[in-house]
Every structure is written in C-alpha cells, then in structure tokens.
Amino acid sequence: MYDVIVVGAGPSGLNAALILGRALRRVLLVDSGEPRNARAHAMHGFLSRDGVDPAEFRRIAREDLAKYETVTVRDVAVASVTADEAGASVELADGTTEQAHSVLLTVGRRDRLPEVGGVAEWWGQGVYGCPYCHGFEVRGRKLAVLGAETSAAHLAVQLTRYSSDVVLFTNGTPEFDEEAAAALKVCEVEVRTDAVEQVTGADGHLTGVRVAGETIARDAMFIKTPLDAHGELAEALGCELMDDGSVRIDEHGHTSVDRVYAAGEAARLPNWPSPWIHAVTSAALGAMVALSIDHDLIVADVRSKFGM
Ligand SMILES: Cc1cc2nc3c(=O)[nH]c(=O)nc-3n(C[C@H](O)[C@H](O)[C@H](O)COP(=O)(O)OP(=O)(O)OC[C@H]3O[C@@H](n4cnc5c(N)ncnc54)[C@H](O)[C@@H]3O)c2cc1C
C-alpha cells in the first residue's frame, strides 16, 4: 500500500513525487509516456534548465527520484482509479492493481493541431504554440501565425515584439473582431487569407508557407492550439470538471472527490482564467499540491492514532 499514487510523470508529477518522497511518503509515480512537449527539442524558461531537451529534463528528474527509496516509478498507463473512504485503488494497463491512501492526477493536456499539411510534422520543431517558450530563439526572423480567430490576431500582434516581419495566414475568411483587425494594421502584420496548402521545411528547419501556389519564406510558425484534457480518469472518478476540461481544484489541490488531488496543466482553480501552461508553473503546482497532500496525511495519521 502506498501513501500516494501520482498519475503522470511530467514536470508536475515529478516534482510532486520528489516532495512527497523526501517527506518519507511511500510514492508510486506512474506514467504512460506521452508528455505534451514530446516533440520539442528544447525547453525554455525553467530556471537552471533553460534550453534543455525535455527528454533530458525528465531523465534528470527521474535520476533525482532514484535517490529516494520511498519513490517507485513505473512506465505504464493507468487504466482506472476508484476512491472511497477506505482509500484509492489504481488499476494499471498491465493488469496489476495498486492501493494508496490518496491519488494525485498530473496527467497534463494535449494540443489539438489544425489539419493543415506540415503542421503536425513541424510541431515543436518550427511550429510552436507559445512565444514565451520559443519566441526569443526566432527573434528578428520571418515569422508566421496560422489562424483566423481573434486569438490568432492577438498572437500575431504579440510576435511583432520579436520580429518586424510577421505574416498572419488565416487559411480562409478572417473571424477576428474590429479591434484585433485595427491592431494588426497598426503593428504592420501582413494578413494572407488564401487557403494554406502546406507548411514546408527542409534539413530540420521550417522554410515557408505555401499559399495559392506560392511559397512565402518563413523561419517559424506560431499557432494557438485548443488544449484537450486527458480527462478520462477524473471524469470516471466523478471529479468536477471546468468548461475547458480542467479538473476543478481548490487552493490545496483537492478535487471534488475525497482522496483525489490534481495538479499541473490538468487542473485549475475556478478563478484562474485558464490553466498555467508552462513547465515551471506545472512543476510549482505539483510541489504545492504535494505539500498539501502531506499535510492531509499528517492529519489522517494523527486521527487514526487517536482512533478518531
Ligand atoms: C511543442 C511544445 C513545446 C513546449 N515548450 C515549452 C517550453 O519551452 N517551456 C515551458 O515552460 N513549457 C513548454 N511547453 C509546455 C510544457 O510541455 C507543459 O507546460 C508541461 O509539460 C506540463 O506539465 P504536466 O506535468 O502538467 O504535463 P505533461 O508534461 O504533459 O505530463 C503529463 C504526463 O501524464 C501522463 N499520463 C496521462 N494520462 C496518463 C494515464 N492514464 N496513466 C499514466 N500516465 C498518464 C502522460 O503520458 C505525460 O507523461 C511546451 C509544450 C509544447 C506542446
């Protein structure tokens, strides 16, 4: 029997397991091997690890965990979780079942990419979602934004801080509002409404965007992707979910189901406008919720000693 089973070994689950393992909690960390940034070669903005390959980041984090006999890591998907007053039970895809006092869901999210040729191929390696993560490296270069919504126009305006050469490819009729259209004009963003035929690249680099038979040379593309939740486990448990699929948590990481906690990109407080979608914020939330889980376990330990 474990104290805590952590589902998902991205920055959030890894940091939670570290805090709990160091608190002498018996922790099982389980992962299905599909981190959100799997396609990226570099992870930026994480203090002391700026620019590291995300796979290397996870390897180092697991190396840290290996020092703690309190932490067990298993590479297997969690098929289902149940929780009641007696504890939590976690069924793994290899057919085994593990028990714990509590479960922490740090299952992350996944990007829903537009169905435009080349986007999936260059995702994370020339096509990006976040200027804070990848804008600095392409400053001064020829940049593209793909999208017809107001959010795409805002992204294009934001990118003019990094480059004076930003083209917004709407791939059809623009849907952005008047204010966004005005901002694009003021910031001198060129808007192309033709159907996008292909995002092109060669030798590991993005090279352009083909519209109407013409290839417009570009060095990088940014898109605002909808983020789907890995919500299956939380939903089956009966955890309250927000409109965007996030697991609703309180300030301590509790979900609406007793003994079930959530952290990282999978979770958010109702008063947050959206989940925080960076590695360092996910790690921080994982650590915060781990501290809160430990606190709840201390209370439970003391109560059981006094037969309460
Ligand atoms: C292309 C790209 C580039 C990025 N670059 C940066 C960057 O430079 N800097 C930055 O700060 N952020 C970056 N991000 C964002 C960053 O990847 C996320 O913020 C971070 O990974 C979220 O951490 P997490 O622990 O919440 O989720 P994840 O890292 O996605 O980890 C969740 C884990 O849970 C596992 N899981 C899911 N369901 C199950 C299950 N049923 N059983 C077992 N395991 C399960 C998954 O396999 C996965 O390993 C980037 C994202 C993308 C897409």
Image (spheres, helix red, strand yellow):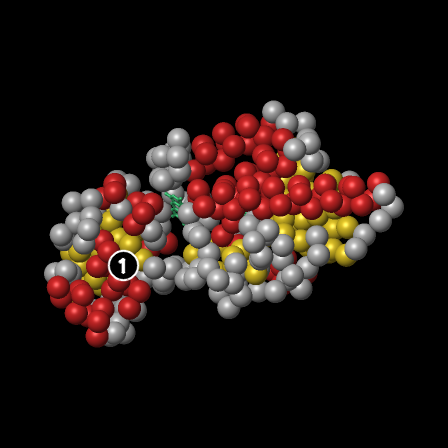
Q: Is residue 228 visible?
A: yes
At horizontal 72% and vertical 41% (from top left) the residue drawn is 298
What residue is shown with label 1?
Answer: 155
Give amino acid for label 1. Answer: Leu
Where residue 131 sits: x, y (%)?
29, 50
At horizontal 58% and vertical 57% (from top left) the residue drawn is 250
Residue 261 is left or right of residue 265, and the answer is right
At horizontal 29% and vertical 54% (from top left) the residue drawn is 222
Q: Is residue 107 visible?
A: no
Q: Nearer the viewer, residue 247 or 10?
A: 247
Q: Nearer the viewer, residue 194 or 131?
A: 131
Q: Quadrant of the N terminus?
A: top right
At horizontal 52% and vertical 49% (from top left) the residue drawn is 264
Query: In this picture, is 98 found above or below 196?
Result: above
Query: In this picture, is 102 found above or below 75?
Result: below
Residue 201 is left or right of residue 255, and the answer is left
Furthest-top residue in this view:
67
Answer yes or no: disc 1 within 8 Å of ligand 1. no
Query: In this picture, is 125 found above or below 51?
Result: below
Where residue 230 sits: x, y (%)?
55, 57
Q: Nearer the viewer, residue 15 or 232?
A: 15
Where residue 184 sits: x, y (%)?
17, 64
Residue 266 is left or right of residue 5, and the answer is left
Q: Nearer the viewer, residue 117 or 17?
A: 17
Where residue 49 sits: x, y (%)?
40, 32
Callout 1 environment at 10 Å: few (<14), some (14 to 19), or many (20+)?
many
Q: Helix, strand, or loop for circle 1?
A: helix
